[in-house]
Image (cartoon, grey):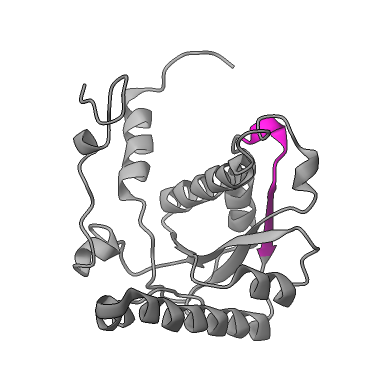
Amino acid sequence: MTTTPYTPAEQAAVYRAIAERRDMRHFCGGEVPPEQLARLLGAAHQAPSVGLMQPWRFLRISDPALRQRLHELVEEERCATAEALGERSDDFMKLKVQGILDCAEVLVAALMDGRDAHVFGRRTLPEMDLASLSCAIQNLWLAARCEGLGMGWVSLFEPEAVRRLLEMPEGAQPAAILCLGPVEAFYPRPMLEEEGWRQGRPLEELVFENRWGQKP
């Protein structure tokens, strides 16, 4: 492997995928061919991981009854979240927060069991296993965008309920329900900005130099 930079066109394609990636909630059915799904999961599997532990596990949900039950668990948490939001509960309930019943594929991304045996890079930061899984999910997300597929990360669920539903071993932990498939269009901006829920902050507000809060 050489250190030769990508061509300008290749660089532009990478940055375009990053800029146009969206957390999708609206899908239009269709399908993801097996060879395409294998490519996307292959991209996920090439993610970096702490101590090369590769903590990710992906469960493809092909059973319609399981998909329906996941949808119900998300709806339960959606209502609980709305209650916790207080005065913003009505606005929250107007948002579409999942596409589990509409998308072509549903994947549950989880952390493996037995993670305590992996100490390299995790002695003081045990959450690096979740960071590693997040890198794998981001790889999958960008690869999907490159191939014209939408993906949405759903985190509104009770982890223990999903773990039991999918018969995961003790110590395994579901971290994301991923909705994947064709979409009619990608949102021009993040959906929560489009819906007026929240505006993203500019980069210059989030970059410091030497000490917290000190501007470059």
Report which quarter residue 48 is drawn in.
top right
Magenta residue check for 80: no
The reply, left or right, for residue 33 in relation to residue 100 is right
- Of 4 and 67, the residue lying toward us: 67
The picture places residue 119, in percent across and down from the top left corner, at: 74, 34
The picture places residue 120, in percent across and down from the top left corner, at: 71, 29
Q: Residue at x 23, y 58 (%)?
A: 188
User: In this orientation, does residue 125 appear?
Assistant: yes
User: In this orientation, does residue 61 appear?
Assistant: no
The reply, left or right, for residue 90 in relation to residue 113 is left
The reply, left or right, for residue 1 in relation to residue 115 is left
- Of 11 and 33, the residue lying toward us: 11
Magenta residue check for 55: yes
* Residue interval drawn in magenta: 49-59
Marks counted in the figure total: 0
Q: Above or below — where is 46 with respect to 1?
A: below
Report which quarter residue 206 is drawn in.
top left
Q: Residue at x 25, y 31 (%)?
A: 213
The picture places residue 85, in percent across and down from the top left corner, at: 33, 74
Q: Above or below — where is 88 with respect to 214?
A: below
Q: Residue at x 67, y 58 (%)?
A: 58
The picture places residue 18, in percent across and down from the top left corner, at: 36, 43
Quarter of the image with the N terminus in it: top right
Q: Residue at x 22, y 47 (%)?
A: 201
Quarter of the image with the C terminus in it: top left
* Residue that extends furthest to the top in the rendered view of this protein: 3
